[in-house]
Image (cartoon, helix red, strand yellow):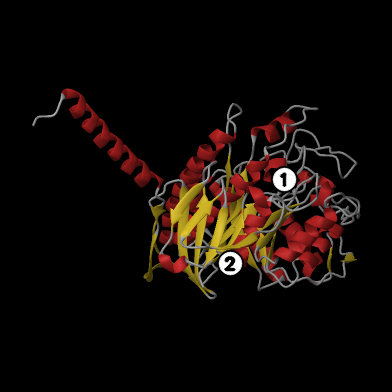
Amino acid sequence: MGLSSKNVLSAIVAVLLCGLTAAAQEAAKPEEVTVDWAKVIRVSQSTPTLQVVVNPQLLRGAKLHDSSFAALHMLGADYVRYVPWLPYPRQAVAELSAPADGKTSWDFAHIDPTLDDFMKATEGHSVILNFSTIPAWMYKTEKPVTFPDDPNQVFWNYTQGTELRDPSMKEVSEYFARLLSWYTKGGFTDEYGKRHESGHHYKVPYWEVLNEIDFEHHWTPQEYTKFYDSVTAAMLKVDPDIKFVGLALAAPSKDPEMFEYFLNPANHRKGAPLDFISYHFYATPTADQNLDDWQYTFFDQAEGFLNTVRYVEQIRKRYSPSTKTDLDELGVILTEDDKEIRQLGYVGKPAPKSYWNLAGAMYAHIYVETAKMGIDVLGESQLVGYPSQFPSVSMMDYETTEPNARFWVLKLLKDNFGPGDKLVETTNPNGALTVQAFETNHGKVLLAINKRNRAEQISLPTEADGATVNLVAPTTEDHAATQETLQGHILSLQPFEVAVVQYK
């Protein structure tokens, strides 16, 4: 007996509905991550850390002083970068006037207290000092550079000039040698033979030579290399064991000649140390974007930076394979920060709360991808920012004075990963996530990062059942990572969550 047209239609609809239901069930099934623990793709040499930039909130008595240095001490990171820099000349430059008539202007009164607190907070861990600002009087300028008497008043125009008044570079080299001697040898003898006692005998394992040389004084590769060789030679006379970090480029993708020239030993004096190079990355969204745009912009720009890292690595390996790399400023600068600096009196709009998780997730993603490349140091920028002083790069909350999610992501990485970990082959079909498995000295660990402003799920290998999950996510707010136990092997991730899955 034949079917009526009505019955035929009903049958077709039923088949279609069954197909759609099956498709929906398949779509709802979390994508599966696979891990081959026997296949090591790289032994990590990557250390997660941060930079500390000097500003008035780090002064004793300031709102953020106590909590910031307590957080730094609690973190216990190595390779912490310390940068007194140009907006506060009296906190960054130890000789603000040229020697004259038998007198000098050496003065550490506004410099030492913060550095002492920093060294105490990082005791037992390696540090990188970077007194990045050369005294303005050492440069040829149309007129003398004037700056505020108030050491806490910001001044953005201190680094004027492009030509040193002493082309031999002896004057500036001796300045940096005296700085090192002040902190490591108990003092120094000044230009007129007078001894200045400091009482400091710190161990300074690393010194970075200047900061963002492509922006500050606009060095050419040839000039900077000459400067680097002169300064390091003078400082090695003070401490033959100190190691150096060079370049600190702000825009590494725009000036490949810097790497080509500086990394070539033929362009240096014989025996010049090429211990480390460094360069920076900040994601920079446009003013018309919001959080929903940022989740794509940040990671897209991070991928561009990672391509730059791969390119620089080829130059480094070709010229100086023993030189290490420190990516010592990694973060985000929102457009509101720039407005505060450029528009007098402008008060920036605060970032949405989830921004801090998103920025932390981006840093964690960069950590994973650069660990695959063998990068040595990954420095999150920076410990303290606040309204008018790049608030979007801060790892401390100015209102609560507590560490924010960016800090807790760094601590999560530092506590669970480091040099010697084995990265193993990990297959992750979910493009919204970064997932990488590690064999560490405390067992099998999987790092999962949600790059999107939505909840995600992934299916882990069945051996993950019962694993401990430590996570930083919107629900943890400005608090340390929370801990959960994985029931089964489906891992659920909040928007912008960073999770460490520790296998049993």
Classify mark 1: helix, strand or loop.
loop
* Mark 2 touches mark 1? (CB < 8 Å): no
Q: Residue at x 48, y 41 (%)?
A: 300
Task: Give x and y (percent) for residue 424.
Answer: 41, 66
Judging depth in this view, the residue of 251 and 391 nearest the camera is: 391
Query: Reading the chain from its start, which is encountered first: label 2 or label 1?
Result: 1
Q: Is residue 217 visible?
A: no
Task: Give x and y (percent) for residue 486.
Answer: 53, 63
Task: Give x and y (percent) for residue 158.
Answer: 76, 40
In the picture, which quadrant includes the N terminus?
top left
Classify mark 2: helix, strand or loop.
helix
Q: Residues within 10 Å of mark 1 (few under 14, many from 20)?
A: some
Task: Give x and y (percent) for residue 19.
Answer: 28, 39
For badge 2, the amino acid type reads Asn
Count of numbered tags: 2
- Residue 504 vertical placement versus 112 (above, below): below
Q: Residue at x 83, y 63 (%)?
A: 116
Tell whether 116 sits left or right of 394.
right
Tell whether 274 sits left or right of 13.
right
Quadrant of the rendered image containing residue 65: bottom right
Q: CA distance from mark 2 to mark 1?
A: 49 Å
Judging depth in this view, the residue of 125 and 215 nearest the camera is: 125
Q: Which mark is residue 165?
A: 1
Q: Residues within 10 Å of mark 2 (few under 14, many from 20)?
A: some
For badge 1, the amino acid type reads Arg
Pointer 2 residue: 416
